[in-house]
Image: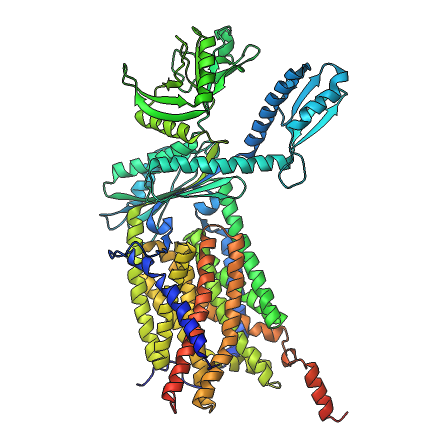
């Protein structure tokens, strides 16, 4: 049987030739992402800001009556709702701030949920209530802080491990590409104003996992080649390493894309945003391994000496014996 | 790398089969196939976000426990010094401390002696639960220590979990999860529960029942302004109506608590057909109740629930039978809820709902069905891709992938973890890592063949060289997952658990098992070339 070969043997693409422009683009994109996050802000879900979210599906309508709903809910006297589509056009979420005093008396937020769901059901016969989430301000602060802590500590520990196994420059490179991936994803969420909740944090973690995996595969080959080709200039060596791992990069990315596209097209709507974020992560992660993680090694002056195997006592004895001392 | 002694082969297969077979109950639970009940059936539970149900996070206020301790100490000190016949005055339990004056200055040491046994060591902290200081010569100040309060909160929460469990069991819901979280929180998860209102009503009720004598000397005008005669306190009615008094004065002491019950049932009043709660005291409680009613025939007494008066009937005759009827404008539901709460005992501390999530069942069932189809199609497409790319080695990779999925499910079932939406993300990531491991190995074997190595040497080098990157990548993920598990909450934790299990099984199936199969094939077929 003739096997499929997507990447020809012995490719020699000069990836690193474009490192400066690509780096500049990345830096600009990262700055733009931060700018967007700071000015436009993330559309934080109730997980992070507290409040109440009611999810509704309009079973017999092709599209949810967002405008009508906004008016109806606003009339109930609990303030302006934030109404958003998620998944299909007939699925929406209604987000409300918790009523005054709900921190002390949970029955107030209960009453609000009952009033709103009853009203929606009364006005729309085909409305199906899919869920109600109420998160108090205190708990939402903790959830946000916990997620941030988990992400931060995990990133630092991973960088420390890579430093240990490779060299400090590699640790910084990996950390940088992590920051790059997370920043761009946050930027995307700021532009599209898709809801950012705890499940998206899990997607972010998956993305980081892929990206790290990619970075380490490239780094492993760089480490190997540094030992093999002591005299090769760094840009050339990095190009060689990226080219040697190119077939693997393409096959692995395609494998993941196949499963993810199946999930995107056929999977449940609740995980659409989540799968979309991971799919994007495959591209961003692959890119950052080649253009963020690798070039930084040139600028941080990694050289083959870092990887000369240190002599063991036995080897030293043998060498001295050979040299006839 | 390619040597596998017989014992190792047997051991590897045994481990694989045990873990993979453990996945069978989880898989059949989604179909109609019934497994014989005699077999052990570890099963992966689906999280509420997938299966539908209610999640409620309850929180207690530690300052309430602190105040309770101060009030309890107040009573104990009064009782103790009364028996010791030492007069004290100006007792105050406000401002987070208990203070009082000893009138006879020479008795200060005697007082200290008397109240010292009322304090205890605070658990294993090596500290006392109270500090006793004397200021201005004869003013005692008793302050609860943080250690003492922490310990009391911890005990109160343990009791609260038990009470919550009893109340939820009384509702007859299936498989509720009730876990204490942190110092002062309880998580309640009830799969399939659609309307948590009844549940919340039950949990929101502390159910502290008291019977106190009404202070008939209090002037209605004083009561209306919230002024109580000495030794009495003002308690509001649970359902203050227009035209009637909104509150009533009751005597602080001389009442009894309604916590010594053996039973509580919702029934209907025979005359009015109004829902009421019938309570039965235990022997001790019955005796106290009989004494109270015998000594106060003709006087009114107040039935107080959670600091609100339900009703204040006259005691027409001594009640000696050990049972009583509580009426108070109940509906059948609220009377039933009160009966359940009284049966399960009072909560030692008020619980407040701070987070609540409900997921509808349609959404859950639909999600699972679509998720299964998507996973099936995705896996099939992936398998085809891997097969046309790597041929025989692709077959091994696919087989490893199938076993990997089964082993993850099996281990999750054995450990008893719950699969949530973020857990699926972890699943996708580990499958990615497993595929990547095989891709790395196979690409490396290809490379080594191109460099002119012979078949066995190329395979051996392929596994050896690729293992380094696989090892580093997976250790990195383990580190990340462990920290996420330690610091994250909810979804982040759910992700981390699946990732941890998945990394272990991915490396095992994608590296160790495929190496075994390749080694056995090489030995059997002795190929001169590899189609790779």
At 46% from the left and 92% from the top, the residue drawn is: B452
Residue A154 position by quadrant: bottom right
Where residue A73 sits in the image (x, y, percent)? 34, 37
Where does the C terminus of chain B fall, quadrant-wise?
bottom left
At 43% from the left and 78% from the top, the residue drawn is: B6
**Scheme of image coloration:** rainbow
Residue B309 position by quadrant: top left
Up the image or down, B145 lies above or below B483; here it is above
Up the image or down, A199 lies above or below B90; here it is below
Q: Is residue A188 visible?
A: no
Q: Nearer the viewer, residue B206 or B479?
A: B206
Q: Nearer the viewer, residue B436 or A313?
A: A313
At 35% from the left and 73% from the top, the residue drawn is: B398
Q: Nearer the viewer, residue B96 or A60?
A: B96
Position of residue B330 in the picture relative to residue A208 (left or right): left
Position of residue B65 in the picture relative to residue B382 (left or right): right
Where residue B401 sits in the image (x, y, percent)? 37, 70
Position of residue B378 in the picture relative to residue B500 (left or right): left
Where residue B307 sits in the image (x, y, percent)? 47, 22
Q: Is residue B374 visible?
A: yes
Q: Nearer the viewer, residue B117 or A61?
A: B117
Q: How many marks?
A: 0
Where residue A312 sits in the image (x, y, percent)? 68, 81
């Amino acid at each position: 049987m003739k096997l499929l070969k997507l990447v020809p043997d012995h490719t020699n693409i000069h990836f690193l030739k474009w490192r400066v422009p690509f780096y500049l683009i990345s830096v600009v994109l990262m700055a733009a992402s931060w700018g967007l996050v700071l000015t436009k802000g993330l559309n934080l879900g109730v997980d992070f800001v507290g409040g109440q979210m009611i999810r509704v599906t309009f079973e017999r309508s092709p599209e949810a009556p967002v405008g009508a709903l906004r008016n109806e809910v606003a009339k109930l006297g609990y303030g302006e709702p934030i109404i958003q589509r998620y998944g299909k056009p007939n699925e929406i979420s209604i987000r409300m701030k918790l009523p005054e005093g709900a921190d002390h008396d949970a029955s107030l937020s209960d009453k609000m949920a009952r009033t709103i769901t009853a009203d929606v059901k009364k006005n729309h016969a085909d409305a199906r209530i899919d869920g109600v989430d109420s998160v108090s301000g205190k708990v939402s602060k903790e959830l946000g802080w916990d997620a941030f802590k988990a992400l931060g500590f995990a990133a630092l520990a991973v960088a420390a491990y890579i430093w240990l196994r490779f060299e400090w420059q590699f640790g910084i490179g990996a950390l940088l590409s992590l920051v790059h991936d997370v920043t761009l994803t946050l930027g995307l969420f700021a532009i599209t104003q898709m809801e950012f909740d705890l499940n998206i944090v899990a997607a972010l973690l998956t993305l980081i996992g892929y990206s790290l995996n990619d970075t380490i595969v490239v780094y492993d080959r760089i480490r190997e080649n540094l030992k093999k080709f002591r005299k090769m200039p760094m840009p050339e060596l990095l190009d060689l390493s990226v080219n040697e791992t190119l077939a693997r990069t393409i096959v692995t990315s395609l494998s993941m894309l196949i499963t993810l596209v199946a999930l995107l097209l056929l999977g449940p709507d609740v995980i659409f945003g989540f799968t979309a974020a991971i799919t994007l992560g495959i591209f961003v992660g692959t890119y950052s391994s080649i253009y963020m993680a690798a070039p930084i090694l040139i600028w941080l002056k990694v050289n083959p000496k870092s990887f000369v195997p240190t002599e063991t006592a036995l080897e030293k004895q043998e060498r001295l014996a050979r040299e006839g001392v | 790398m390619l040597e596998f002694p017989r014992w190792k082969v047997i051991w590897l297969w045994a481990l694989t089969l045990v873990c993979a077979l453990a996945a069978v109950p989880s898989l059949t639970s989604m179909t109609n196939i019934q497994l014989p009940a005699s077999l052990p059936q570890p099963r992966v539970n689906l999280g509420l976000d997938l299966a539908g149900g209610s999640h409620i996070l309850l929180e207690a206020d530690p300052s309430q426990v602190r105040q309770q301790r101060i009030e309890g100490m107040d009573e104990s000190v009064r009782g103790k010094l009364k028996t010791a016949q030492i007069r004290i005055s100006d007792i105050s339990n406000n401002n987070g401390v208990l203070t009082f004056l000893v009138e006879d200055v020479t008795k200060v040491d005697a007082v200290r002696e008397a109240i010292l046994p009322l304090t205890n060591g605070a658990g294993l902290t090596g500290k006392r639960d109270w500090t006793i200081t004397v200021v201005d010569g004869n003013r005692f100040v008793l302050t609860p220590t943080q250690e003492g309060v922490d310990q009391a909160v911890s005990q109160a929460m343990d009791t609260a979990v038990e009470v919550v469990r009893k109340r939820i069991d009384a509702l007859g819901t299936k498989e509720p999860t009730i876990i204490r979280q942190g110092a002062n929180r309880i998580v309640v998860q009830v799969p399939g529960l659609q309307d948590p209102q009844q549940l919340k009503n039950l949990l929101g009720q502390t159910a502290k029942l008291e019977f106190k004598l009404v202070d008939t000397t209090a002037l209605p005008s004083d009561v209306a302004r919230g002024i109580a005669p000495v030794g009495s306190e003002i308690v509001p009615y649970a359902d203050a109506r227009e035209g009637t008094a909104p509150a009533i004065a009751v005597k602080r002491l001389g009442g009894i608590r309604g916590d010594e019950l053996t039973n509580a049932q919702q029934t209907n009043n025979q005359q009015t057909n109004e829902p009421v709660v019938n309570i039965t005291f235990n022997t001790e409680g019955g005796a106290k109740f009989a004494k109270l009613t015998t000594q106060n025939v003709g006087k009114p007494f107040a039935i107080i629930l959670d600091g609100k008066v339900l009703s204040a009937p006259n005691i027409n005759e001594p009640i000696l039978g050990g049972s009583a009827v509580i009426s108070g404008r109940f509906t059948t539901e609220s009377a039933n809820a009160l009966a359940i709460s009284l049966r399960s005992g009072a909560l030692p501390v008020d619980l407040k709902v701070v987070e609540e999530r409900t997921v509808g069942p349609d959404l859950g069932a639909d999600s699972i069905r679509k998720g299964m189809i998507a996973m099936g199609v995705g896996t099939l497409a992936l398998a085809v891709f891997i097969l046309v790319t790597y041929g025989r080695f692709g077959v091994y990779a696919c087989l490893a992938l199938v076993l990997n999925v089964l082993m993850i499910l099996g281990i999750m079932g054995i450990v008893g973890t719950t699969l949530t939406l973020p857990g699926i993300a972890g699943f996708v990531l580990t499958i990615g890592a497993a595929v990547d491991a095989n891709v790395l190995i196979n690409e490396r074997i290809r490379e080594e063949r191109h460099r002119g190595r012979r078949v066995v040497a190329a395979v051996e080098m392929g596994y050896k060289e690729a293992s380094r990157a696989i090892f580093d990548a997976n250790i990195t993920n383990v580190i990340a997952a462990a920290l996420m598990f330690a610091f994250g909450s909810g979804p982040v934790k759910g992700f981390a658990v699946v990732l941890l299990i998945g990394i272990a099984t991915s490396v095992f199936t994608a590296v160790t098992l495929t190496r075994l199969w390749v080694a056995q094939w090489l030995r059997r077929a002795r190929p001169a070339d590899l189609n790779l």
